[in-house]
Amino acid sequence: MSSEQENSIPSWKVAVTYQNDKMTDGVGAQLQRVYGIYALSRLLKIPYIHSPLAKVDYQGLKSLEENSGNQGFVDAFNRRFAIKSDVAVPQSYYVIDVHSITTEAMDAITAQAQSLDRPVIVRITLPYGITDAHPASYECCKEISPFSHLPPNKERLRVAVHVRRGEMMVVAADRMLPNDYYIEVSLRVSRLLEEMGVPYSFEIHTEIPTREIELKPGENGIQKSIGAPRRLGPEASKIDEFAVIPNATVMANAEAIDCLSLLSTADVLITSRSSFSYLGGVLGRRNSVTLYNPFWHPALPGWISTANDGTFDEAAFRERIRTLMA
């Protein structure tokens, strides 16, 4: 073997990347998987290779209204949320596709790879068999977040509330938290901040139909999630109910990339049962405060869990705000 051939063989045996051609649903769900795979690479000390998003089926309520989607939507997210690869893709390698990875499966692949003549790239769709068992693994994502370097807004804290609606109103209405939940959490946050003498403003981030539309199976972003056509109109959101929240602005139907940026840079984030705002908490600053209503992914260390009636640990919230303002 020549020295040139020896130098062409990577020193690493196994690397992980996102299997970007299997589940192409929403941008929040896919980016949570991407950052989850990066997180497990750090946890297991395995090189990470970045695979950008290839396709996003649900591109927001506007795309549903127009029954359209565009690659520019995907490209914008890929530019903003690019993660530097640890190693280059070699000329020759094996590929193993894994839908849902576990630590045991990763250990078995790593052991097998030691005897192979080429490195192995493991393309993973779902990292949650590892990251859900080790939610603290996501903490490393703050170091590469596009937003983590930004300072807190000490003059007036921004409280971002993610009210997940859009296609879920017809696809998964049982997963949505009611307006009353968000209102109760927000009113408690408002009371606590006023008691502490901290100026604040609320942003209500949601999607509201601008007109009555008919959603059909197989259309953009819906795929096969509904078995028959469903109608959706502006009145379904009942957005006027949020008027009781002090200093609040409804920021409906913003571009998805702008909305995710605002959620990630908020001083206080009230999440929904959604990967979109879960990702906002993952990518937020270390001292930001996340109020989290539990769903199938566990809270990160330091997040404050909320009950369905909107209550949460107020003493923990006060302490987090004091740390944020220090």
Image: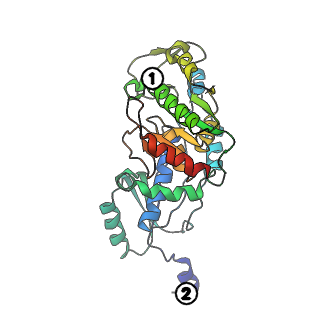
Q: What's under tag 2, amino acid-wise?
A: Ser
Q: What's under tag 1, amino acid-wise?
A: Asp
How far is disc 1 from disc 2 in space, using C-alphas?
70 Å
Can the viewer see residue 311? Answer: yes
Residue linked to disc 2: 2
Compared to residue 224, the image places residue 127 above or below, namely below
x and y percent of residue 199 in the render? Answer: 65, 36
Compared to residue 94, the image places residue 54 above or below, namely above
Answer with mark 1 or mark 2, whichever residue precedes in sequence. Answer: 2
Which is more toward the observer, 1 or 93? 93
Q: Which of the 4 image quadrants contains residue 124?
A: bottom left
x and y percent of residue 322 in the render? Answer: 56, 48
The residue sitting at 56% across, 52% down in the picture is 323
**Is 295 on the left-hand or right-hand side of 325?**
left
Residue linked to disc 1: 180
Q: Are marks 1 and 2 in contact (CB under 8 Å)?
A: no
Residue reaching furthest bottom?
A: 2
The residue sitting at 47% across, 58% down in the picture is 39
Q: Which of the 4 image quadrants contains residue 254?
A: top right
**Is 257 on the left-hand or right-hand side of 217?**
right
Residue reaching furthest right?
A: 155
Q: Secondary structure at mark 2?
A: loop
Q: Which mark is residue 198?
A: none
x and y percent of residue 90 in the render? Answer: 54, 69
